[in-house]
Image (tube, rainbow, N blue to C red):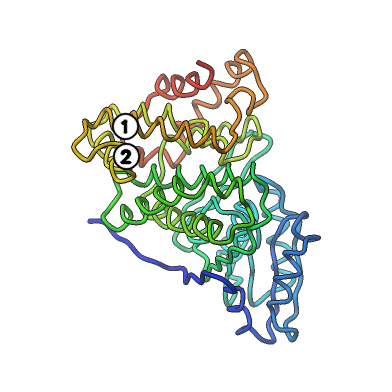
Amino acid sequence: MKTFFLQTRIYSGEGSLKVLQRFHQRKIWIVCDGFLATSPLLDKLRQALPADNQITLFSDITPDPNIATVVKGIEQMQALRPDIVIGFGGGSALDAAKAIVWFSRKQGLEIETCIAIPTTSGTGSEVTSACVISDPEKSIKYPIFDDEIYPDIAILDAALVASVPAVITANTGLDVLTHALEAYVSPRASDFTDALAEKAVQLVFRHLATACRKGDCLITRGKMHNASTLAGIAFSQAGLGINHAIAHQLGGQFHIAHGLANALLLVPVIRFNAADARARKRYARLAKLCHFSPANGDDRSAVNQLVHQIEQLKRQCGLPQPLAAMKVNERQLQQHLPDMIAAALADVTLRTNPRPASDQDIRGIIEALYE
């Protein structure tokens, strides 16, 4: 038996920040990073909130939020006891806000509403039951999954992502593609998650390159914002896979952006998973759906076409080569391999990969990065 449910109410489209006008005389706590704390985007968020609210800010969020940051946030939240928590920013800010609220609730501190407002189009964190917390001492990222982590409200306003630089647009957009692909081949996939993943894949191939070139096009930005959320719902229900299990280690060891780590691994992961007949057929179905391959084409050829289109999209978006992205050489990568393999095997996302993976399999996927 499979289940599918939607726990987060989603508001999207032009002017969707107006939803915040319903909140009056509340204690509102905004969680964001230091950059957003001094940006015009925060001013836009403040202006959307009625003046009779009491607003405070927690802006200590850094990329890959760590345990210490979450603990500090919990302490501040317990002191302020807000009615509403707003996670505002990219995946790091949203994950941190969700983690802080989740742990605080477990300690008996209830809030009225948790709101997620993304300012990048990638993680889908605004609609997922997941958050990722890092441990810098061990160079490991810990994904946490729990249905109580879902935000109550997600607000998707394309105007908030219009100024995102091309490099971040590319990284986060390919994160969307990874989420959709992994959800689609997951053994927990269903007709419901398939519909969301298929649409997300189509939107990414159709709009990501344009979003990188013409960031001020709100129609394109809105499509990528929607794709991110669609893929987020899909993987939150169906799960992820080996792409994320390894990407978490690349990020933990080499501190590269999560979306970039996923993008670097996409092709070797697809080739590994496509050895499984069901996964191969599903990758082929996506290739045919996107008209990369004839409807009556051979599945293996269709998978090759999907891989070709991914490589072309990466070039169009200006993604660097793997070792250049990680800023390491082959010898340095080899030194980290044992720890990375062990951590990837223990990563919870590996459980829903369509094909079992051994330590040698993971080694082969990582080593494919410098072939």
Which amino acid does the dot numbered 2 rest on?
Ala
Asked whether, in this view, residue 302 is left or right of residue 226, the answer is left
Compare residues 359 and 15 and report the one nearer the observer. Answer: 15
- The part of the image, by quadrant, that contains residue 54 is bottom right
How many numbered marks, from 0 up?
Answer: 2
x then y, percent, for residue 136: 68, 38
Compare residues 252 and 280 and report the one nearer the observer. Answer: 280
Identify the residue at image location x=62%, y=43%: 134
Examine the rendered structure and indicate whether residue 87 appears above or below residue 50: above
Which amino acid does the dot numbered 1 rest on?
Val
Asked whether, in this view, residue 318 is left or right of residue 240, the answer is right
Identify the residue at image location x=59%, y=55%: 95
Which residue of the protein is positioned furthest toward the right in this rendering?
Answer: 38
x then y, percent, for residue 132: 56, 48
Asked if marks 1 and 2 touch (Cβ < 8 Å), the reply is: yes
Give whichever of discs 1 and 2 has the lower sequence position. 2
Residue count near mark 1 (Cα–Cα under 10 Å), binned few <14, some 14–19, many ≥20: many
The residue pinned by badge 1 equals 303
The residue pinned by badge 2 equals 287
Residue count near mark 2 (Cα–Cα under 10 Å), binned few <14, some 14–19, many ≥20: many
- Mark 1 residue element: helix
